Image (tube, grey):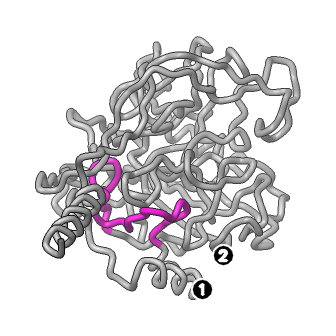
Amino acid sequence: MLSDVMSVLLILGLVGSAQSVSSGLTVADLYAFKPIDRDRVEQNTGLKGEVSITGASNGKSYLTVYTNGIPSHDNFKWPRGDEDRPIHLKETKAAFNIPKVPKLRDNPIMCVPFGIVGVATGGVLIYNAYTPRKDCPIALQVEAFDMCYGHPDPGGAYHYHSHSTCNSMDVCGEPSTIFGVALDGIPIYGPFDENGKQLVQEDLDICGGRVDKEGRYKYHITGDPPYLLNCFRGELHKDLWNTDHPKGWKPFEMDCTCPFDDSSFPACFEDPWCEDETDSDDPAVRAAAEKAFGARVRGLPNKPLTCDWNNTVGDFATCTDKVNTSYTPSFKQVKEQSTISLIPCCPKGKDCGASCVNNTKCYTEQRTGSYMVTRILSSGGARAGAHIMGLVVVLLMLLVLW
């Protein structure tokens, strides 16, 4: 414990006090990264959850976030009997290097990579908001989740797409604590601001963040789509991929797909539970996917996020959004007036347990406002075009025969 305290003090020596830090993790934030229940043995793997942040005294410009990807809270037994795909939860070790002192960009990285965008304080991976299928539906609205709003991906990695009260239970009317950290080193907080007001997307900037009254920039998770960070406000560290860590994550191309480009995803015309699982490491899942969608090689989307990890500016990679305007999605995101349920919270002085799902002790605010929805363009996109062209061909053939 003494060494932990010394490490934290060293961080203070490097980045100053919390009041002077524009976007980095505070001492309290660092201490929050620990398993929810250290002694809990996860039922699918027989393992315990692990998460840590190290490197405060290494003299380098980054901290290393490590997780084994095992939830240390309640979760389902996977695969579920009521699902039509045999996905298992597996250990997913990952280590990322995030800036000790995040650098805010003048122009955000709009292209958030599909999949991992951060790590929760309890060690669960945080994915972006979308599902890998045509029309870029919001995952929380179309996929199956457990009582903690988590689930495994086709490769077995358990993750969140939104807030989870199992990771962080907010007290109604009080400031949220930290929920996790993004790959750019900027903390992700719960939905309540420093005054105890629950925020929605219209209270935040384009990336889903804001500067609080102390001058700190933070991302916030909200109860309206897209729920969490929609772009990176900070630079990515040149050593983001910790390949030297014995449990490091293999570098991968940081492709950008939804909500800009869905061309690399399968067309789910009739299948409501359709995902690209042709690259799953489970032979049964892969075989079923190839049978459903046809064996294919998943190509890069038309809007990749290009990060040059060698041509760096100081400690940061050079990242640029590359836009190909030749592709027009068959959907658009618009704001419409509606009443929604915000993120549940626990009334002050009550014990609400570990989750607010189906929990009457928790309070859920209903709020009317203008919120984002995805609308399919009836006259646009490959799907509508293909269907219309098919009807035209059939009509022409009937006229010729007649």
Instruction: Name the amino acid, label 2.
Output: Pro
Q: Pick whichever, 367 or 346, lies toward us.
A: 367
Q: Residues within 10 Å of mark 2 (few under 14, many from 20)?
A: some
- The kind of secondary structure element at disc 2 is loop
The magenta stretch spans which residues? 253-276
Percent x, y of residue 56? 51, 49
Residue 108 appears anywhere in the view: yes
| Residue drawn at the location 40% of the way across and 83% of the way down | 294
For the C terminus, the quadrant is: bottom left
Q: Is residue 50 left or right of residue 255?
A: right
Q: Is residue 30 above or below residue 384?
A: above
Q: Which residue is under mark 1? A: 284
14 part of magenta stretch? no
Whether pointer 1 and pointer 2 mark residues with C-beta atoms closer than 8 Å, the reply is yes
Q: Label for residue 86?
A: 2
The residue furthest front is: 402
